[in-house]
Image (cartoon, helix red, strand yellow):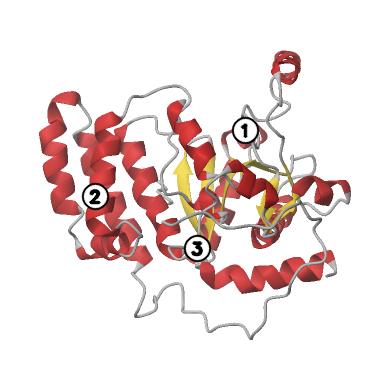
């Protein structure tokens, strides 16, 4: 079975700017460590993911309510394994903060149809694997409010790019009012398989490097699938911490802190592609990029969560600039 895997908000300038012009990132490409042999200063992510996979098997065996004490004892022991401690200790919360947050998430957990965490095992998987994201980008300020997302010059307008046929993936926005939600509900009843059943993007904005990453994956996915297969579908991109807490209040497994609030994470639809027979093709493409050290992958069921690795940022920024002609 495949098991993939503090700061105050950014002070942004006013106004939404188009995708060009942009500032080029200076300097030569950094030396990138081998994905199979981590840098001496960074945790071994392969060992971390393997340790998490083993932990998940044991958590699954203790998923019933009477096993609460046994689960806590298990986590106290397993989280202190060097491979896991190294990652958690490198997050902004540190080991103790990450451990306490996980235990609190488990204590509060209530399964519901909206949450990507269908059970306690899924909750632990999503939390622990997403800590790679916040470890990678621990020095990056979050987008605290919706206003910061909408005004940040570090983000580009996807609609501006889509209208110029510069995107290799699809998305839909969340309806802005009751009428929009009603029209979408009617379309879903008439054409239930036409699009994934997702709420859509709250913010149609993204970092340039993430656009380049998704375009790369979209092109690769299109070339690897039969004609007529729908393009890559993105279900979530940047979120404010303000919106993340709104999602939590509605029952979603929206972790805090999150790579979405840093602008370097995206969710891509998976389940919908089963009807086209290409879900495993997309899964293999994503896991290959994870093995190459370019992204972190978290299986969240219907969608998979991706986060860009810092080592790939400069290459993808230059790719964006070349593709957009800036």
Q: Hey, which quadrant is residue 122 in on the image?
A: top left
Q: Residue at x 39, y 75 (%)?
A: 38
Q: Residues within 10 Å of mark 3 (few under 14, many from 20)?
A: some
Which is nearer the eye, 224 or 184? 184
Relative horizontal placement of residue 294, taking residue 150 as reference (left or right): left
Residue that mark 2 sits on: 99
Q: Quadrant of residue 180?
A: top right
Where does label 3 land, which residue? 140
Left or right: 202, with 104 as reference point = right
47 to 76, vertically: above or below: below
Write the residue at 24% across / 61% down. Answer: 85
Ranked by sequence position, the earlier of labels 3 and 2 is 2
Q: How many marks?
A: 3
Marks 2 and 1 sit apart, C-alpha to C-alpha, by 34 Å
Label 3: state its secondary structure.
Answer: loop
Question: Is the residue marked by circle 2 packed among few (<14), some (14-19), or many (20+) residues within 10 Å?
Answer: many
Pointer 3 and pointer 2: residues touching (CB < 8 Å)?
no
Name the image quarter holding the C terminus.
Answer: bottom right
The quarter of the picture where the N terminus appears is top left
- Residue 269 image offset from top left, x and y in percent: 60, 39
Residues at marks 3 and 1, CA–CA distance in whole angstroms:
33 Å
Please report whichever mark, 3 or 1, sits nearer to the chain's N-terminal start. Answer: 3
Q: As displayed, is residue 305 above or below residue 153?
A: above
Side (left or right) of 128 relative to 134: left
Q: Choose mark 3 or mark 2, whichever is in front.
A: 3
Residue 150, given in percent of the width and then of the height, sits at 68, 46
Quick one: 143 or 15, which is closer to the camera?
Answer: 15
């Amino acid at each position: 079975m495949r098991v993939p895997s503090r700061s105050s908000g950014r002070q942004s300038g006013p106004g939404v700017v188009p995708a060009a012009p942009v500032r080029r990132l200076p300097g030569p490409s950094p030396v990138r460590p081998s994905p199979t042999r981590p840098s001496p200063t960074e945790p071994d992510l392969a060992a971390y993911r393997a340790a998490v996979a083993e932990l998940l098997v044991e958590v699954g065996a203790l998923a019933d309510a009477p096993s609460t004490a046994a689960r806590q004892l298990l986590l106290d022991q397993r989280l202190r394994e060097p491979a896991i401690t190294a990652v958690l200790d490198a997050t902004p919360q540190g080991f103790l903060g990450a451990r306490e947050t996980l235990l609190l998430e488990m204590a509060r957990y209530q399964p519901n149809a909206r949450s990507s965490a269908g059970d306690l095992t899924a909750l632990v998987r999503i939390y622990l694997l997403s800590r790679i994201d916040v470890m990678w980008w621990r020095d990056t300020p979050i987008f605290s409010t919706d206003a910061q997302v909408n005004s940040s010059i570090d983000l580009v307008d996807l609609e501006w790019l889509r209208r110029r046929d510069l995107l290799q993936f699809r998305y839909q926005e969340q309806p802005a009012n009751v009428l929009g939600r009603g029209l979408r509900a009617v379309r879903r009843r008439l054409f239930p398989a036409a699009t994934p059943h997702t709420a859509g993007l709250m913010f149609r904005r993204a970092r340039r490097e993430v656009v380049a990453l998704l375009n790369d994956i979209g092109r690769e996915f299109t070339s690897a699938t039969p004609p007529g297969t729908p393009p890559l579908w993105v279900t979530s991109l940047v979120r404010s911490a303000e919106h993340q807490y709104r999602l939590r209040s509605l029952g979603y497994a929206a972790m805090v802190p999150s790579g979405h609030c840093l602008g370097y994470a995206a969710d891509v639809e998976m389940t919908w592609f089963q009807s086209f027979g290409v879900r495993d093709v997309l899964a293999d493409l994503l896991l290959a990029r994870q093995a190459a050290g370019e992204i972190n992958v978290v299986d969240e069921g219907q969608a998979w969560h991706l986060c860009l690795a810092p080592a790939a940022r400069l290459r993808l920024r230059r790719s964006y600039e070349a593709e957009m002609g800036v």
